[in-house]
Image (cartoon, rainbow, N blue to C red):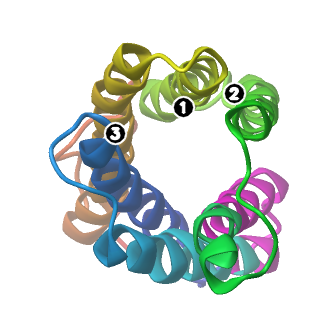
Amino acid sequence: MDNLANPAPLGLMGFGMTTVLLNLHNAGFFALGTMILAMGIFYGGIAQVIAGIMEFKKGNTFGTTAFTSYGLFWLSLVGLIVMPLKGMGTAAGSTAMAAYLFVWGLFTAFMFFGTLKANRALQFVFGSLVILFWLLAIGDFTGSALIKQIAGYEGIICGLSAIYLAMAQVLNESLGKTILPTWPVQTVEKK
């Protein structure tokens, strides 16, 4: 019997909240600062890696790959920003950042196919994340501030969808019934 807690809400919240905050910056609401960098390290980064390790313990290859990879994405993104400021290499140029974001979009596109037998909420999270990565890559490659701003708004939607899915899993399990549907609606059994 599997009596381990579901680590997915932790990973989804780490991803979702950090994604919303970074994309509020991309949409132009505030400057990039320590608030986003700290979230990228501790919640987007470390919490997702922990969730990925917990998914490994549960035997979930998809969850392990997703949460560990995206946790390390956040840590590497913060590294790309902070390391040059500390004299550890030169800052990545716009073409390099476009390539970085493109390959993360490619990885996410492959992961999206892994959601096709899952609920629609998870499919939306991954589908919107593919779009986000590729909009950001195009924005960096072309230097278009407008595309990056559009990506910011799309990223807010992506992050909010992950928060919704996390809270659906927590509330539906905690209350033993479907409070927030994830389509298709599945019966929740109270433990």
Q: Nearer the viewer, residue 1 or 174?
A: 174
Q: Position of residue 23 (x, y in %)?
A: 33, 43
On residue 26, the disc is 3
Q: What amino acid is labelled 3 in the image?
A: Asn
Q: Are marks 1 and 2 in contact (CB under 8 Å)?
A: yes
Residue 19 part of the magenta-drawn span:
no
Q: Are marks 1 and 3 in contact (CB under 8 Å)?
A: no
The answer to whether residue 150 is left or right of residue 120 is: left
Q: Is residue 44 above or below residue 153?
A: below
Which circle's residue, 1 or 2, is located before the other in the chain?
Answer: 2
Circle 3 Cα neighbour tier, 10 Å, few/some/many (<14 / 14–19 / ≥20):
many
Q: What amino acid is labelled 1 in the image?
A: Leu
The residue where tag 1 is placed is 129
Q: Position of residue 71 (x, y in %)?
A: 64, 67
On residue 112, the disc is 2
The answer to whether residue 6 is left or right of residue 179 is: right
Q: Which residues are magenta?
A: 54-75
Q: In the figure, residue 29 lies in which quadrant?
A: top left
Residue at screen point 60% across, 27% down: 140
Q: Nearer the viewer, residue 134 or 120?
A: 134
Secondary-structure class at tag 3? helix
Query: Which SS type dominates the magenta stretch?
Result: helix
Q: What amino acid is labelled 2 in the image?
A: Phe
